[in-house]
Image (cartoon, helix red, strand yellow):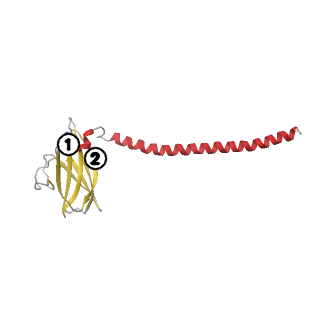
Amino acid sequence: MDKRSVSYKLSKGFGKKGISEVAIAVILIAVALAAIGIFSVVFKSELKKNIEETASPCYGISDISRVNLLKGCYLNENEVMVEVRRDAGDSLNISSLRLIFYPDSGDSAVWRVRDGKKCSDVRRAESEYGGYCEIVKSGETARYVFDTNGIEKISDMAFSIFLENSEGEEKECVIGKASVSEKC
């Protein structure tokens, strides 16, 4: 056998083997990049969620979970009742409540209930309009009635509380959202 034909056969076989090795390497790199891409999308969204949660001014205040928006419903055509529960034993210094009502269309309506302030269009269920507002106390469930006359039909609401620190500064803590039922 001629040396040239042996080296030709070797180089010919080696060349095919080299191409398949390159193809396998490219495929492995592509799979690795795809896996990195998928992992980064999942990790990025989870990281963003954790950053947003820890950036909240209420992060780490364990008693926040003791304040709950129980329900919202129409008492009649012009009044919405909202029920709020505050579990016993919390140490929260709540200075005010905020409720945002979202109509089916149009602008939202915002109420802020401050302890001891005159309330013309919000009342406790057991009182009249025009009295003084009262914040739900620890261990209590309160029903607030809002005069929604002139506001389009409300479908959803959001509820938050404002906490006051020893320097008198307030921070808002979002409690949650709920639908407003047609009837109580």
Residue at 46% across / 45% down in the picture?
A: 42
Q: Which residue is mark 1?
A: 94
Residue at 17% across / 50% down in the picture?
A: 142
Q: In whole angstroms, how far apart are the C-alphas of marks 2 and 1?
A: 13 Å
- For label 1, the SS is strand
Side of 14 relative to 6 (left or right): left
Residue 157 lies in what quarter of the image?
A: bottom left
Percent position of residue 29, x then y: 60, 42
Which one is nearer the viewer's eye here, 28 or 57? 28
Say few, some or many: other residues with alpha carbon within 10 Å of mark 2 (under 14 / 14 to 19 / 20 or more).
some
Residue at 69% across / 44% down in the picture?
A: 20
Which one is nearer the viewer's eye here, 140 or 160? 140
Percent position of residue 51, x then y: 38, 41
Side of 176 relative to 3 (left or right): left
Tell me the quarter of the image containing the C terminus: bottom left
- The amino acid type found where label 1 is placed reads Ile
Q: Which mark is residue 159?
A: none
Tell me the quarter of the image containing the N terminus: top right
Q: Which residue is mark 2?
A: 174
Percent position of residue 41, x then y: 47, 45
Q: Is residue 43 above or below residue 74?
A: above
Of all residues shown, which one is farthest toward the top? 166
Percent position of residue 172, x then y: 26, 44
- The amino acid type found where label 2 is placed reads Val
Upstream in the sequence, badge 2 or badge 1? 1
Residue at 82% across / 42% down in the picture?
A: 9
Say few, some or many: other residues with alpha carbon within 10 Å of mark 1 (under 14 / 14 to 19 / 20 or more).
many
- For label 2, the SS is strand
